[in-house]
Image: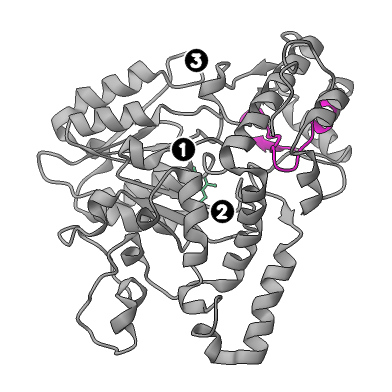
Amino acid sequence: MSFPSLVGAVELDAAELDAADPLANLRHEFDLPKGVYLIGNSLGALPRAARDYVGEEFDRWATLGGEGHFSGQFAWETYHELLTQQLADLTGAQVDEVVAMNSLTVNLHLLLVSFYRPTTERHKVLIEDHAFPSDHFAVESQIRQRGFDPETSLVKVASRPGEETLRTEDLLAAIIEHGEQLALVLLPGVQYYTGQVLPMAEVTATGHRVGAYVGFDLAHAVGNIELNLHDWCVDFAVWCSYKYLNGGPGGVGGAFVHCDFVENRDLSKFLGWWGADPATRFQMATQFEPIPTVESWQLSNAPILPMAALRASLDVIDRAGGMGALREKSERQIEFFDRRLAETFHDRIENITPKAIGQRGCQQALRIVDGVGPQVFEALREERVFCDWREPDVIRVAPVPLYNSFADIDRFVDVLDEIM
Ligand SMILES: *Cc1c(COP(=O)(O)O)cnc(C)c1O
């Protein structure tokens, strides 16, 4: 199903757009806090079915005990495999390239162990100047851990003075400039502050041209925009599931390693028993025989309860028709949101999100000037309009196509207008 072709041709209002929205009913698959919930970029909504999926695992635990590890379709030993196909679909990967495990920063460290292998000639890591603190800390500590100095080995690419977003030409030029000294490029798929989608295919191609590995943090990208990690030849990627994947607070993370590397025994890797071939795992041998997929990066037996919650959400995403269908609705919502902001505020509010639809996900980053941002944000909260505040002066608002309506966007703009 698709939006009628008249959408966009005339300027429909929120009620008309909601009536034409083939995904409008999915909202009822979620329990949303009372009010207008627009922070799926921070913590996605609770899928109602998660209570059943998790409850089933409690029941299996209560009735089967330890036999639950090996019994039936939902055996805990192989439970993580139940998520693989859906995660592969969401990231544009093969099933041997993705795994649900650990949490984002843990996975980032594990993959830096494999893909950051500095030498005296080639030791630099390129990140963005405004990188999420955890990514920054992870990279900095790995540089030190290998005996290098972030002062000389960490390259940070910034936006130009007076500009908010990174220019593709500046990113590519920096990669080429550091060329033979560059070991690794690590960037976000979607920048957490501005909502900018970075040119992942071009960055990867340019990184590879100078001989560097290229990895992405997809915290704000997975479940938000369409991804093609395999075809883009990305070396590795990591993500969390509690933002656009609605996996619940602290939910299980994910990792991608390109198939070119999944069987490479020369890559440095931190090992655990869950990365070893299940056929030999319980023989308790100490000769490591890796699973011939990205699962060989697994360390520990999987956290079943958060995985059960995540499965509930991934099943709703499947029913929506996957990321293609969600992105189609999301683009309508972005257009509508832009139109409402422009006609209501003109230039009273600065939108620092990129304008081009191909360079943004569903998040809008609105700059509130004159130092009144915190009061405006507080007033929105009192009206139970949930968005989030990022220092120094930005309100982030993310209409999520799975469960947000066009009316939610309308309500946000109306309340903000009253407050301003
Ligand atoms: C949300 C987010 C994280 C969070 O990391 P955790 O390990 O899941 O706590 C890391 N990096 C980016 C870019 C994020 O947006």
In the picture of the structure, the residue carrying the numbered disc 2 is: 241
Q: Quadrant of residue 275?
A: bottom left
Task: Give the mark nearer the N terminus: 3 vs 2.
Answer: 3
Lateral position of residue 270 relative to residue 3, left or right: left
Q: Which residue is mark 1?
A: 227
- Residue range corresponding to the magenta coloring: 387-410
Q: Residue at x 33, y 64 (%)?
A: 297
Where disc 1 sits, the SS reads loop
At horizontal 52% and vertical 65% (from top left) the residue drawn is 82
Which quadrant is home to the C terminus? Answer: top right
Q: Could one spot residue 41 in this view of the protein?
A: yes
Which residue position is annotated with label 3?
163
Residue closest to the eye, 182 or 154: 182
Q: Say which of 354 and 121 sits in front.
A: 354
Label 2: how many Cα within 10 Å (few below 14, some 14–19, many 20+)? many
- Using the image as rendered, state which of residue 201 and residue 133 is in the foreground: 201
Seen in the picture, residue 190 relative to 106 is either above or below; the reply is: above
User: Element under label 3?
Assistant: loop
Real-space CA distance between mark 1 and mark 2, rounded to the nearest whole angstrom: 15 Å
| Residue type at the position of mark 1 | Leu
Q: Nearer the viewer, mark 3 or mark 2?
A: 2
Q: Few, some or many C-alpha atoms within 10 Å of disc 1 (few <14, some 14-19, many ≥20)?
A: many
The kind of residue on which mark 2 rests is Ser
Place residue 247 in its image quadrant: bottom right
Give the residue at x 52% y 79%.
75
Q: Nearer the viewer, residue 38 or 407?
A: 407
Above/below status of 305 relative to 262: below
- The tally of labels here is 3
